[in-house]
Amino acid sequence: MEVSTIDTEKEVKYTKKKEKKISLKKLKKQKFLIFMSLPFVIWIIIFKYLPLFGWVMAFQDYKPGKSLFDQTWVGLKHFKVLFKEPQFYQSLQNTLAMSILGLVFGTVTAIAFALLLNELKNAKFKKSVQTISYLPHFISWVVAASIITSMLAPSGVINQILLGLHIIKEPLSFMSNPDFFWGIVTGSDVWKEMGWNAIIYLAAITSIDPELYDAAKVDGAGRIRQIINITLPSIKPTIIVLLIMSIGNLLNIGFEKQMLLGNPVVADKSLVIDYYALNYGIGMFRYSFGTAIGIFKSVISIILIIIANRLAKKSGEGALI
Amino acid sequence: MRRKITAFDTVLAIIMIIIAVVTVYPFLNVLAISLNDATDTVKGGIYIWPREFTLQNYKEIFEGSSKLPQGLLISVLRTVIGTFTGVLASAMVAYTLSRREFVFNKFITILFVLTMYIGGGLIPEYMVIRGLGLVNNFAVYILPGLISAFNVIVIRSFIDGLPEALNESAMIDGANDFIIFTKIVLPLCLPVIATVALFIAVGQWNSWFDTYLYARSNDGLTTLQYELMKVMGNATGTAKVDPNNPIVQAASVNPESIKMAITMVATLPILLVYPFVQKYFVTGMTLGAVKS
């Protein structure tokens, strides 16, 4: 009963609020709220919205030292140059490849790990494995890259295991073979994030009605049957929502891993779109060109988000935004 | 009812142990190598226990003209100051946005939420930060990333769950919003503040790219993570430690051991606090997941 009265009270407040307009009296009454938020409104305008005005650089031949208004306008020149660059297509291909590999393997391993973890009956063992599993999530990519390059070095543990099992005859130089690069990035990602990403699936699994399992047991279903017929279908909505959400981020894989694990020898496979923008935009002082790359990426991302949102509505999980 | 231990359970346990070993082994290996005599390490065969125990590697990285002590100091400073200011700013914004009657509530909410979807991108942001004179300035570690919209939403939804009567009774007592925020809301928000603080702190400690982009030409401002990144020497293309790095050159021992010692220093704070705080991280993750 109590809850419902509070709700109606809130509703009354909302409608009241809508009726009222901003008045001087009200502003005066809320001066502390205004003082408390003003610095951060200024902050967000400077650091998050001012850069958006920088987008005009992409349509100019930006020269440092002059204001944005005094630059020469060149229209779509930088975009035309960009779409002719073979390196641009290469970076796009690398970005999508590593992004999709990461999404597929990241999702599959996290779900599998969550399912297996859920089957552990010893609570202490389960807790320990889980706690250990998300430890790597909290270390920086610099540390992770340092560790991974050591493990994959010619004298590293991976080569020793492969030699010991007689799978290879001499140590492989993983880090300097372009063919291995996508796999190394994907594998590193799985190693670092699998446990962390499993948390959300585990939360979904714990909310499944235990009666479903009891019914299945009566029907004689074994544990693997139960996983396939009850657990997986029950967490399907979670899986779909997370997959759809990652569509909008397909191009936003950043460049940390690629920059830290990559090197000039594997550059053909490690160059991703953000790194490309960084190299050209800041490294070579081609600010306008770099901005054009950024705009291209943002436009594609917004399109992807809209598509994802449509998919979400269709799948019946509700819009994401 | 006692369950029988089936073949399924055994296979499961083995898989889980393998996962745990694969996760932990690299850390133990790094630790063992960092504590092993550098000349002896070259012979190979160091797994999880040092063969010839020594602290020499750690001495090397902190002695002489090494930039590591200063990197450590900057890392600690940015973590402490960045976490304090970040939490305070996020909580303050979250509080004003939790007040439904606030006339600019909707406007400010939209301002913050939009930043989760659009951004100016790397180069325009770089230009703004450079224009503000933040390059080679300690403030570049604090100001540009002061507030994340995500943290604001997490704290606000926590405040929304607090009983509203608290605010109202304080209002009647004549307390203004600033007093309500500092005296009533902030203390009640401690659980969510702890979670947000941990996330900001880990982010600050682990950050290296801002140093790379904005502060690498100021020798006094480089962080631990950045110094480690430099030692790794990706530029050489051999995935070997950069032999031209000043820290490596100054050291008299094998570069790989130097790298391992620095890696350990960069990881240790996280490993040390991790067992005590990991439950807050998970709370935060689930909290955020529910919201988004």
Image (tube, coloured by chain):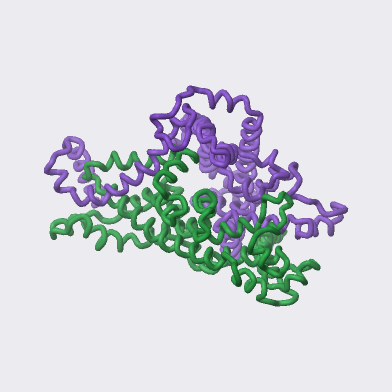
Please state which of residues B168 and A257 is positioned toward the viewer in this rendering.
A257
On screen, residue A52 above or below B233: above
Say left or right for A246 vs A10: right
* Quadrant where the N terminus of chain B is found in the figure: bottom right
**Which residue occupies the foreground of this view, A236 or B121?**
B121
Query: Where is residue B13 drawn, in percent x and y?
Result: 68, 61
> Quadrant of the image for the C terminus of chain B?
top left
Q: Residue furthest left?
A: A25
Shown in green, the chain is B
Q: Is residue B282 left or right of residue B9?
A: left
Residue at figure coordinates x 69%, y 77% from the top left: B54
Is B36 left or right of B66, judged from the image as shown?
right
Q: Is residue A258 visible?
A: yes
Q: Nearer the viewer, residue B157 or B39?
A: B39
One can see residue A304 in this view: no
Q: Which residue: 71% across, 72% down?
A: B36
Q: Quadrant of residue B77?
A: bottom left
Measuring from the top left, give residue B61's x and y in whole percent.
Answer: 62, 69
Question: Could you tell me which residue is drawn at 62 percent across and 56 percent down?
Answer: B230
Question: x, y (%) of residue A19?
Answer: 17, 35
* Image quadrant where residue B19 sits: bottom right
Look at the picture and state if B36 lies above or below A182: below
Q: Which chain is purple?
A: A
Q: Residue furthest front?
A: A65
Q: Is residue A216 found left or right of B90 in the rendered image?
A: right
Residue A168 place in picture, x, y as percent: 85, 52
Q: Does residue B92 lie above or below B36 as drawn?
A: above
Q: How many marks?
A: 0
The front one of A292 and A66 is: A66
> Residue placed at 70% from the left, 64% from the top?
B255
